Image: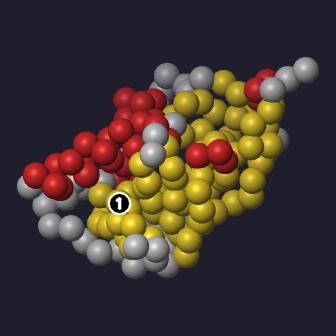
Amino acid sequence: MSISTDFVTFYLGGHYFGINATDVLELNRNLEVTPVPKSAKTVRGIMNLRGQLVPAIDMYERLHLERESGLTESISIILRSDGFLVALLVDDVGEILTLDQDTFEPPPSIFSVVSRELVLGVHKLSDRLLLILDPKLINQRTEKAKNQLLIA
């Protein structure tokens, strides 16, 4: 019997990504992002989520993807990992998919170093590939950026 996992899927720059559903706290539309001077390039700013400040990560910058002109992310995927909240700014959210381990492969060697660092692997679907991101690595980098904000 194969092990299956639920993934929240989302779109960014024409790519199809997934993140383990157990790491996703909630999805929000059009939350205001307040820019923070001298923050890391990947941190677009902070959001007020029911009184808690949450760093908003520009996933185009984080994944080194080219932004299509006129396209603005309006959906935030709020993750909780190791007790730390972070908002991933994405173009659109897809469905929740339950996938078996037998469709999973490690990331291809042609991926850039940054992509290989964040992408755990790829699920081969019937009509496309689903790139699975590692939320802990996104959080680790964001925690470093957050600490830099506090001492800058």
Q: Is residue 69 visible?
A: no
Foreground residue, 92 or 88?
88
Foreground residue, 4 or 60?
4
Q: Residue at x 40, y 43 (%)?
A: 139
Q: Residue at x 65, y 45 (%)?
A: 22
Q: Is residue 24 visible?
A: yes
Q: Give the x, y percent position of residue 75.
A: 53, 69
Element assignment for label 1: strand
Q: Give the x, y percent position of residue 89.
A: 46, 62
Quarter of the image where the C terminus is located? bottom left
Residue type highlighted by circle 1: Pro
For this orientation, the residue located farthest to the right is 1
Q: Residue at x 49, y 78 (%)?
A: 30
Question: From the viewer's perspective, is 151 left or right of 50?
Answer: left
Q: Give the x, y percent position of residue 7.
A: 69, 46
For this orientation, the residue located farthest to the left is 152
In the rendered view, tell whether residue 19 sits above or below residue 122: below
Question: From the viewer's perspective, is 123 left or right of 147?
Answer: right
| Number of residues whose C-alpha sits closer than 10 Å to that of mark 1, classed few (under 14), some (14–19) or many (20 or more) | many
Question: From the viewer's perspective, is 41 left or right of 96?
Answer: left
Q: Quadrant of residue 113?
A: top left
In the rendered view, tell whether residue 48 sits above or below residue 124: below
User: Which residue is labeled 1 in the image?
Assistant: 55
Q: Give the x, y percent position of residue 126.
A: 82, 41
Quarter of the image where the N terminus is located? top right
In the rendered view, tell whether residue 89 sits above or below residue 81: below
Q: Quadrant of residue 101?
A: top right
Question: From the viewer's perspective, is 2 left or right of 31?
Answer: right
